[in-house]
């Protein structure tokens, strides 16, 4: 039976992209001067793993490129070539090209030859050149490789022998756990000239053969300049599942006549029988953690589950939460001893439901470090391009967020970091003149606070120039020529669409398409953005995010017979209105005076065309809410309880409605609409008959 390797493609690509991230992080540490043997081993293992998986699946171009890269890395590992900043730049570009090649292969499209051919040729030229004759030798960073007591360093060891005598005797479970000995022999053949002898003395009769147990042994002689560690690397997946002996090969002991040759390095995967489906999977497992390779067989601590299955589970839990709420509502009016017992059981049921809900939510949680990890490379590249000396500090990278939230904050954080580098951090000479260190600092910090996740992006640069922002806003007509604004409102002007204070457009910033995108994307997921800046000391952007988009902490508000849910994260305060605090403009626009600020009043019964119990302002309540740096007051009849609600999409089941973020089911079976505060403000400003006056007021 032929094994269909296509079923493993998704896993291969997922784990290859993750491994490239680890490789990039290790290379950045090398470029920072933290050069040690373990870092180089980590980088080598990634290349080795991707090469093996690509060859197994027939991705020839990826395998060929990675083979050359692996050869260069093996030279670094064996001490034949020094590590230097120029070489690290080449390796980082190799990571970019590999990522692009894998993406193209995943889309079943050819990679751009102009992108790959030039770098591949450059790698081949470096590999074939003498180690110390590279053009970057003057900037070489010494690397100390770990040497065990009693053993010579790898470079000296390779020079002292002609090669290695190797004996491989597979264990009973080796193939069952996904390790293919023929693939290992093919990998050995890439290191030099391989001569093999097969020992078939343990083979039973045909009737007794178990196809999942390998009873063959191999005696091999490998003529190569590669180190012992390079040979050991090939068999690392089979550690503990085979008997492996490696001895130096002296000239007198070398075999002159080969008995049997191993399969060539470019042999098709189909040329060697695969014992089980796990054999293909073994070729693509993350190199840094061999034990993870066997997690699918029951020996590890994790499995891969599609996000669709988790969403289905979360939706089912949400329905159970609603059903539990309905049962509690019905039981509240019952009387008698059995009614008390039922209510006690429902309390316990609610406790278990909340625990189940939290457990399912944790399944979707991922550490924000998966987003943070993209920034060390970005900071390094931007610093080199702009001629600035930069340092990135990160903390709280293990703070967890829902996967959907995590996916939506990536682009806003990229905008913020790029702005901090380009607009915030000064050039080294300006920093020296201001009495600062030449090294500018960008900080990323994440932490939990009050049921939300706070992400802060800060810099120790020049800070925002309020006068410059104000002048640009007046020039563009965003504010009047004589209008005075508070410092907070001046800073919030940079969130206006198209606003930029850059004097020249560059490929980093200056087109004014960044900060408005940040605010819009954060608002779409129920978050909030705050900006702080101190002239000469730096700036900070604080983003408050919900833990998840599936459950919302909301305040229930009644307008007539309708119940609306206002996200608690948007509420500033709630006020009992007095008549002398309200002013009217033409066409019935109403403003509420809150201390030194005038806030537009939004009558929800008019906005949504429903019948309210109260139309006189002193008879109701005003909820002050904030979004996009603007505040409005929502006029409602009554405030009810606060509770967590399960969000149901209107767009999925009906259509998108401006000012509504979704709906939920209450305990009594009624449907309550969830307000989208930014949308409420937009709908209010566009609503006749007081659209013009309302726009002026807001």
Image (tube, rainbow, N blue to C red):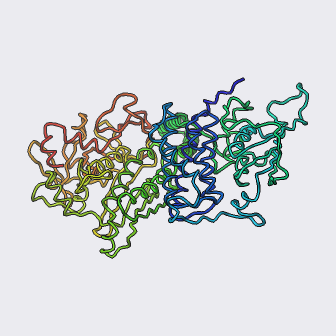
Q: Quadrant of residue 200?
A: top right
Q: Residue furthest bottom?
A: 435
Q: Where does the N terminus fall, quadrant-wise?
A: top right
When the figure is inspected, residue 351 is found, relative to residue 142, above or below; the finding is above
When the figure is inspected, residue 412 is found, relative to residue 387, above or below; the finding is above
Instruction: Name the residue: 52% across, 47% down.
Output: 365
Residue 155 is left or right of residue 11, and the answer is: right
**Looking at the image, which is closer to me, 211 or 599?**
211
Instruction: Name the residue: 15% across, 47% down.
Output: 590
Residue 164: % across, % down: 78, 51
Instruction: Name the residue: 65% across, 27% down.
Output: 4
Residue 172: % across, % down: 83, 39
Residue 296 is left or right of residue 648, and the answer is: right
**Looking at the image, which is closer to me, 507 or 262?**
262
Residue 9: % across, % down: 58, 34
Instruction: Name the residue: 81% across, 39% down.
Output: 258
Residue 596: % across, % down: 19, 61
Residue 203 appears in the picture as rendered: yes
């Amino acid at each position: 039976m032929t094994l269909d390797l296509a079923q493993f493609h998704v896993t291969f690509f997922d784990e290859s992209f993750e491994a490239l991230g680890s490789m990039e992080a290790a290379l950045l540490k090398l470029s920072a001067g933290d050069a040690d043997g373990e870092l180089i081993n980590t980088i080598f293992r990634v290349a080795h793993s991707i090469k093996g998986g690509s060859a197994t699946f027939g991705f020839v171009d990826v395998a060929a490129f990675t083979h050359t890269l692996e050869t260069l890395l093996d030279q670094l590992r064996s001490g034949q070539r020094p590590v230097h900043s120029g070489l690290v730049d080449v390796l980082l570009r190799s990571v970019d090209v590999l990522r692009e090649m894998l993406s193209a292969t995943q889309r079943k499209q050819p990679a751009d030859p102009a992108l790959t051919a030039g770098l591949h040729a450059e790698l081949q030229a470096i590999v074939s050149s003498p180690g110390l004759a590279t053009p970057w030798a003057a900037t070489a960073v010494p690397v100390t490789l770990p040497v065990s007591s009693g053993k010579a360093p790898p470079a000296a060891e390779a020079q002292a022998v002609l090669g290695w005598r190797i004996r491989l005797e597979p264990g009973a479970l080796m193939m069952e756990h996904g390790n293919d000995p023929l693939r290992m022999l093919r990998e050995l053949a890439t290191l030099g000239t391989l001569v093999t002898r097969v020992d078939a003395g343990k083979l039973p009769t045909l009737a007794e053969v178990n196809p999942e147990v390998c009873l063959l042994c191999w005696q091999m002689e490998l003529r190569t300049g590669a180190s012992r560690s390079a040979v050991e690397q090939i068999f690392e997946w089979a550690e503990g599942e085979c008997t492996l002996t490696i001895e130096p090969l002296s000239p007198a002991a070398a075999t002159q006549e080969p008995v049997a040759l191993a399969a060539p390095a470019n042999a098709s995967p189909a040329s060697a029988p695969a014992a089980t489906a796990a054999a293909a999977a073994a070729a693509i497992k993350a190199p840094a953690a061999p034990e993870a390779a066997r997690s699918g067989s029951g020996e590890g601590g994790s499995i891969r589950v599609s996000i669709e299955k988790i969403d289905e589970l979360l939706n089912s839990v949400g329905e159970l939460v609603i059903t539990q709420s309905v049962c509690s509502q019905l039981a509240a009016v019952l009387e008698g001893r059995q009614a008390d017992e039922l209510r006690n059981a429902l309390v316990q049921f609610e406790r278990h439901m909340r625990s189940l809900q939290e457990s399912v939510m944790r399944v979707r949680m991922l550490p924000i470090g998966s987003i943070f990890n993209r920034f060390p490379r970005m900071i390094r590249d931007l610093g080199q391009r702009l001629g600035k000396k930069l340092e990135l500090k990160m903390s709280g990278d293990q703070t967890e967020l829902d996967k959907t939230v995590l996916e939506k904050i990536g682009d806003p954080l990229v905008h913020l970091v790029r702005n901090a580098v380009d607009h915030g951090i000064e050039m080294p000479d300006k920093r020296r003149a201001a009495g600062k260190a030449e090294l500018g600092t960008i900080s990323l910090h994440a932490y939990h606070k009050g049921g939300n996740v706070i992400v802060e992006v800060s810099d120790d640069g020049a800070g925002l120039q309020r006068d410059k922002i104000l002048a640009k806003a007046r020039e563009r007509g965003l504010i009047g020529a004589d209008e005075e604004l508070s410092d907070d409102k001046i800073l919030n002007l940079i969130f206006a669409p198209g606003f930029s204070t850059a004097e020249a457009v560059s490929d980093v910033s200056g087109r004014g398409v960044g900060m408005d995108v940040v605010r819009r994307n954060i608002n779409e997921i129920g978050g909030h953005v705050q900006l702080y800046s101190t002239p000469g000391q730096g700036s900070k952007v604080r983003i408050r995010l919900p833990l998840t988009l599936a459950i919302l902490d909301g305040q229930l508000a009644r307008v007539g017979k309708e119940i609306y849910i206002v996200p608690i994260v948007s509420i500033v305060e709630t006020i009992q209105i007095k008549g002398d605090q309200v002013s009217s403009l033409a066409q019935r626009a109403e403003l509420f005076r809150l201390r030194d600020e005038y806030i537009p009043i939004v009558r929800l019964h008019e906005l949504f065309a429903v019948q309210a119990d109260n139309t006189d302002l002193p008879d109701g309540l005003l909820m002050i809410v904030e979004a996009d740096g603007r505040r409005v007051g929502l006029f409602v009849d009554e405030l009810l309880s606060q509770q967590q609600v399960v969000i149901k999409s209107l767009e999925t089941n009906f259509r998108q409605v401006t000012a509504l973020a979704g709906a939920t089911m209450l305990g009594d079976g009624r449907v309550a609409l969830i307000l989208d505060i930014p949308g409420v403000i937009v709908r209010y400003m566009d609503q006749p008959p007081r659209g013009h006056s309302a726009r002026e007021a807001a």
